[in-house]
Image (cartoon, rainbow, N blue to C red):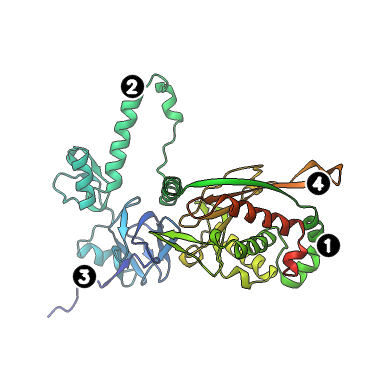
């Protein structure tokens, strides 16, 4: 009896759980090609959700023999998106060939290939004959991305004919890039906030003289003792905590017909990341010292730049602070981060002439903007909140001494 087998054991590559309320992701890109050897725990594919980008690693060493979804396709949590065949890499190609596993599938027309529900829905809605679309998936499988690309090319052709502004010679200078899932979700959430909340913005300005002096005096000893730079954000977080405790509506949210008042303070700090704006959260900020807040901010900022933020870093904030000043913004009207009811906008520090005790002096000034949901926060409360923040920043001993 011939005991030699031509089939190899394989392990599935599965979309992992990605946190509460997230049920699907998009294939951002495959890091390994079908047919390549992989080692155990080697990153194979990047998945993109509306909040984070994460890598899925190889479940075992072997050959990536099956890539079941292409870049741009949407996959559900728990879905099998590929397989790694286990075995000796030096012998693997022969055994794969005997098992009739096609390592390099050729693209071909999708006439006789079954369509996935999402692809079938798309071609039906747009009245497209799938036989005219070349499938780029496994074994010529037609993917959702193939159909969308086909539709985009049709739109481009129609626009080039109908629009006199788009001359043919300009086509080579146009780059079309599909929006990332994160960018699409950011747009959806911002539009949701505008459509749902009654957003108003109130402004004030703060004299940063005392904080600038305090930082200049203490920054070296602070960094030497705590291993973190004494930045501005910890002062703003502390100032907002004072104001949030006095005006609890700003830390609350609306849920149906109920007002949810939160007696904890998880402060989101908006930062720019390569994939877009993200808002990691400082948990229980009211229980942290200046040093702990600065350490948290540095750690979260580093993770954001490296694309390593986890879901637990991003969910559950009660109030957000956004610093457009790092990009040079002098004044803006920040948009709420649903379901939160308030967001503070920081801006560029700029020396300006101001009147102090009847005299014109030059001071480092910053405009502050509080956007708030008028359904839950009254104008008086919003103005009072911003004044408290201003008072704490102009007199930092109040937050240092908790008075």
Q: Are marks 3 and 2 in contact (CB under 8 Å)?
A: no
Residue 7 marker: 3
Residue placed most toward the observer, 90 or 227? 227
Q: Are marks 1 and 3 in contact (CB under 8 Å)?
A: no
Secondary structure beneath dot 1 equals helix
Alpha-carbon span between mark 1 and mark 3: 71 Å
Secondary structure beneath dot 4 equals strand
Q: Are marks 4 and 3 in contact (CB under 8 Å)?
A: no
Residue 217 marker: 1
Alpha-carbon span between mark 3 and mark 2: 56 Å
Alpha-carbon span between mark 4 and mark 2: 56 Å
Residue 178 image point, x, y percent? 40, 43
Residue 162 marker: 2
Secondary structure beneath dot 3 equals loop
Residue 254 image point, x, y percent? 44, 58
- CA neighbours of label 3 inside 10 A, class few (<14), some (14 to 19), many (20+): some
Q: Tag 1 or tag 4, which sits nearer the N-term?
A: 1
Residue 380 image point, x, y percent? 60, 52
Q: Tag 2 or tag 4, which sits nearer the N-term?
A: 2
């Amino acid at each position: 009896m011939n005991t030699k087998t031509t089939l190899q054991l394989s392990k599935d590559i599965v979309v992992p759980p990605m946190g509460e309320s997230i049920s699907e992701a998009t294939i951002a890109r495959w890091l390994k090609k079908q047919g390549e050897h992989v080692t155990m725990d080697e990153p194979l594919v990047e998945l993109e959700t509306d909040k984070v980008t994460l890598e899925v690693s190889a479940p075992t060493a072997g050959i990536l023999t099956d890539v079941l979804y292409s870049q741009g396709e949407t996959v559900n949590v728990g879905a099998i998106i590929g397989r790694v065949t286990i075995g000796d890499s030096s012998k693997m190609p022969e055994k794969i060939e005997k098992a009739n596993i096609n390592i390099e599938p050729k693209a071909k027309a999708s006439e006789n290939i079954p369509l996935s529900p999402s692809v079938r829905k798309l071609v039906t809605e747009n009245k497209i004959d799938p036989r005219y679309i070349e499938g780029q998936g496994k074994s010529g499988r037609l993917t959702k991305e193939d159909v969308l690309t086909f539709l985009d090319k049709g739109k481009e052709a129609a626009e080039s004919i109908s629009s006199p502004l788009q001359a043919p010679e300009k086509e080579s200078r146009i780059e079309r890039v599909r929006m990332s899932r994160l960018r699409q979700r950011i747009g959806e959430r911002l539009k949701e906030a505008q459509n749902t909340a009654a957003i108003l913005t109130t402004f004030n300005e703060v004299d940063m003289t005392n904080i600038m002096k305090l930082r200049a005096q203490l920054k070296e000893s602070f960094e030497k003792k705590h291993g973190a730079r004494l930045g501005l954000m910890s002062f703003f977080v502390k100032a907002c905590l004072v104001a949030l405790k006095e005006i609890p509506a700003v830390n609350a949210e609306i849920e149906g017909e109920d007002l949810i008042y939160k007696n904890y303070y998880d402060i989101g700090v908006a930062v720019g990341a390569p994939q877009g704006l993200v808002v990691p959260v400082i948990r229980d900020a009211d229980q942290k010292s200046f040093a702990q807040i600065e350490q948290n901010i540095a750690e979260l900022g580093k993770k954001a730049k490296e694309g390593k933020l986890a879901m637990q870093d991003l969910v559950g904030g009660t109030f957000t602070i956004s610093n457009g000043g790092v990009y040079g913004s002098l004044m803006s009207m920040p948009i709420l981060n649903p379901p939160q009811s308030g967001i503070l906008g920081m801006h560029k520090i700029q020396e300006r002439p101001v009147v102090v005790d009847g005299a014109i002096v030059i001071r480092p000034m910053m405009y502050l903007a509080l956007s708030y949901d008028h359904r839950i926060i009254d104008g008086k409360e919003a103005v009072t909140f911003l004044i408290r923040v201003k008072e704490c920043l102009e007199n930092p001993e109040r937050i240092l001494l908790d008075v």
